[in-house]
Amino acid sequence: MNTYQEKLNLLAEMIAFSVVDGNLHNREYQFLSIVAKELQIKKEDFKNLFHQELAAIPIKSENQRIQQFYRLALLMHCDGILHEKEEIAIKQMGVNMGLNPFAIKRILKAMQDSPTRMIDGEMLLNIFKEQLN
């Protein structure tokens, strides 16, 4: 990520996704707060993102799109409840990012099968690379 505005947009996308089921769970808020800190977003800007809508800025780098997709998938699982709306939304968001639908399904399945709902970064990248061949 290059600019502060791009970071704000990534976080705004995650916030919008976190409420797709109609509820912002406390664990989702905590996860979003951690991501905001990692992206070095000011606390005031983070809080304001819950009350405004930003125009989407496309992510140019494939690795950054994969990373954002994985963040969204982690967010989806962090409250311990997998809603049908979340699953539909994340698949659509991944496709809109230009990610391979078969890789998206494999990633989500691998995360669902994992006891921690996390997967290794190398595995994540390899699944997307396999779909390129």
Image (cartoon, grey):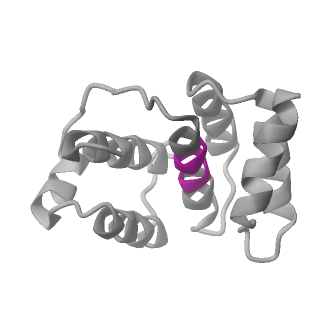
Instruction: Please provide percent x and percent y for residue 124.
Output: 74, 54
Instruction: Please provide percent x and percent y for residue 129.
Output: 79, 39
> Residue at left 24%, top 64%?
40
2 or 27, which lies in front? 2
Is residue 70 in the magenta section? yes
User: Which residue in the rendered view is the most extreme toward the bottom?
Assistant: 115
User: Which residue in the rendered view is the most extreme toward the left?
Assistant: 44
> Residue at left 84%, top 57%?
110
Secondary structure that dominates the magenta span:
helix
Judged left or right of residue 104, residue 35 is left
Q: What stretch of residues is rendered in magenta?
A: 66-71
Is residue 91 in the magenta section? no
Instruction: Please provide percent x and percent y for residue 112.
Output: 81, 60
> Residue at left 15%, top 51%?
48
Judged left or right of residue 41, residue 70 is right
User: For residue 51, what is the image quadrant?
Assistant: top left
Judged left or right of residue 117, residue 72 is left
User: For residue 98, what is the image quadrant?
Assistant: top right
Judged left or right of residue 130, residue 67 is left
